[in-house]
Amino acid sequence: EAGVAQSPRYKIIEKRQSVAFWCNPISGHATLYWYQQILGQGPKLLIQFQNNGVVDDSQLPKDRFSAERLKGVDSTLKIQPAKLEDSAVYLCASSLAGGTAYEQYFGPGTRLTVT
Amino acid sequence: AQSVTQLGSHVSVSEGALVLLRCNYSSSVPPYLFWYVQYPNQGLQLLLKYTSAATLVKGINDFEAEFKKSETSFHLTKPSAHMSDAAEYFCAVRRGGSQGNLIFGKGTKLSVKP
């Protein structure tokens, strides 16, 4: 079965510019997660969707970050405007449903560099 | 609140030697604990998970971890390191509530010397 797809794999932008990342989860997976992984740290959850509804966005910097999951399938994460501290790998993951009974499958990530 | 602490940001072992990666947790609810591996330029892959069944958990590639409540630990071990085990390893704990999302440690980078 195909894994979680993400694009682009790499992106370099200047501060104050905007950027968008795309994620296509494994077919049939209802739950989708976006994580931010800063160099030298573990992934930090930004937002969790159940189908097309938001379950948890408590750690999403809502003044500059937004995410949507139209039709409950693929998802887009946007940063506008970007700051230097947003340089990180953005990981998308999906699972059949929420809860620890269901394994999260991770995509390869998008590496963002903000200059 | 839940948290994990991974002791040692970098561990180096010789090929064939024992691998021991340390993880301590803090949880206000019965903990569900996980170990993930990340190879360069790849996403995370689940190695094993503890969900309150057996305290000794076996995972893929001969890795295992033991849940010790008295020590609040969930250390990852492998009897004999292989060159292909070189990667970064993350311990994670389930966040409280029904969402089931995870809180990750800072990771331990494992190097394997020939």
Image: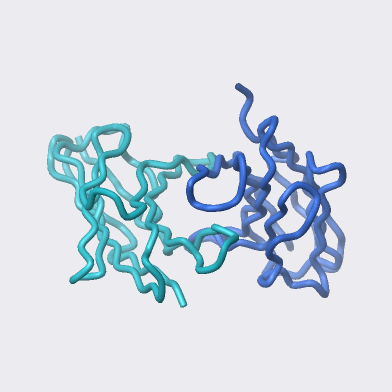
Residue A69 vertical position relative to residue A63 in the rendered view, above or below:
above
Q: Is residue B84 left or right of residue B14?
A: right
Residue occupying the far top of the picture = A1
Q: Is residue B24 left or right of residue A32?
A: left
Q: Colour of chain A?
A: blue
Q: Which chain is cyan?
A: B
Quarter of the C terminus of chain B within the rendering: top left
- B9, A92: nearer the viewer: A92
Q: Is residue A27 left or right of residue A96?
A: right
Asked where in the image residue B100 lies, by quadrant, the reply is bottom right
List x then y, in percent, for residue A115. 74, 63
List x then y, in percent, for residue A10. 70, 44
List x then y, in percent, for residue B89. 37, 50
List x then y, in percent, for residue B109. 35, 52
Which residue is rendered at x = 65% and y = 52% of the image?
Answer: A33
Which residue is rendered at x = 20% and y = 42% of the image?
Answer: B78
Q: Is residue B34 left or right of residue B8?
A: right
Asked where in the image residue A96 lies, by quadrant, the reply is top right
